[in-house]
Amino acid sequence: MIQEHDALLLENTLIKKYQPRYNVSLKDGKSYTYICIKNERFPRVFFTRKLIKDGSQYFGPYTSKYRANILLDIVKKLFTLRTCNLNLSEPMIQKGKYKVCLEYHIKNCMGPCEGLENESDYNLKIEQVRNILKGNFKQVKDYILEEMHRHAENLEFEKAQALKEKLIAFENYQSSSTLVSHTIKDVDVFAISSDRNTAYIHYMKIINGALMNTDIMEMEMNLDEDFSDLLAYCIPGIREKFNSMAPEVIVPVPTESEDEKLKITVPQKGEKKKLLELAEKNLQYHMLQIRQSALNSQKKMSSAERILTTLKNDLGMKETPFHIECFDNSNIQGTNPVSSCVVFKNAKPSNKDYRHFKVKSVEGPNDFASMEEVVYRRYKRLIDEGQKAASTYHH
């Protein structure tokens, strides 16, 4: 019997092999980055690309590794958390199984392995890490301020100063976060556009008015499919993928939802309309980059490669026609039928390979029979001489 993890691996492999039309989770073949809060005593916080069902919390996915790095850096600056993978169970700590490492001496860890930090204080910091990853910045700021005042009242001025510096770093991070609305709190924004047979969906995750995450999905579409149907299909999967709990979704066209509690908004003006316009501008910029990238790739090709690639695409060929032979027939009022063969190699005429044929078996003006004869004679000779036949087009 197939096991769960084997089934997931098989699913992933088949999706990447066959590229199904409506798969928005794995079609791009990428594994996104998550920030994990490990389910353990004195939890660690770290990057991962694997989701393990062991009770750990995963935040993301983050399509921008740069943004995820910023988040993890601010967490490390604000809170001293352990990075080792030791089993910090209470019996092990009480038995003195561990000794503090360099991280403790350079003040990156408070030494829970030797019982120098209690579990409740550590978990308060983990709770604030959750708030940062969820975008709940006010709770984090209040926590730091409260701790700073507590140390000041206890005349622990060095600790209070250290917390003040952390508060400044956090406020700098908060100010650098993209604030897109002062009035709108939690909302998901979707913009959609298409280019030939490909639909592009841009997603923006807004928490407390700040842009927390973005992503762009690509889907194949048919001519008879409309944007409403595509959005109705994709929105639930995208929201689940990004762990969105927003009560409202902003879309450009009316869209149905199976979730009766989810509010669907098609804004006509105001802040919500501006959010939608921002998503649409981002999407158009992304599509422009794709087209520009395709043009740059063509420019890097030689003139011959560009011509042959265009010809291949226009004619729907499987292989690039590096060698082409073309035939034409002629006669003088039904008499003296002749035929010619012109040859192109790498998109250039190959004069030395041109051939002229006198039609032998056909009487009268019969183009079809003449063509049959010269084509047969041409390729029979090539086969007899052991040469490879070319891509051939008849005129």
Image (cartoon, rainbow, N blue to C red):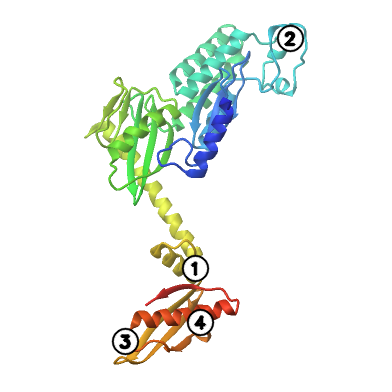
Q: Residue at x 45, y 29 (%)?
A: 241
Image mark for residue 350: 4
Q: Is residue 120 visible?
A: yes
Q: How many marks?
A: 4
Could you give the CA–CA distance between mark 1 and mark 4, rounded to whole angstroms?
A: 17 Å
Mark nearer the N terminus (1 vs 3): 1
Could you give the CA–CA distance between mark 2 and mark 3, rounded to whole angstroms?
A: 100 Å
Could you give the CA–CA distance between mark 4 and mark 3, rounded to whole angstroms?
A: 29 Å
Quadrant in the picture for the C terminus: bottom left
Q: Nearer the viewer, residue 316 or 241?
A: 316
Residue 360 is left or right of residue 249, and the answer is: right
Residue underneath mark 3: 365
Identified by mark 3, the residue type is Pro
Residue 250 is left or right of residue 57, and the answer is: left
**Dots 1, 4 in contact, CB < 8 A:** no
Mark nearer the N terminus (1 vs 2): 2
Residue underneath mark 1: 305
Give the foreground label among 4 and 3.
3
Mark nearer the N terminus (2 vs 3): 2
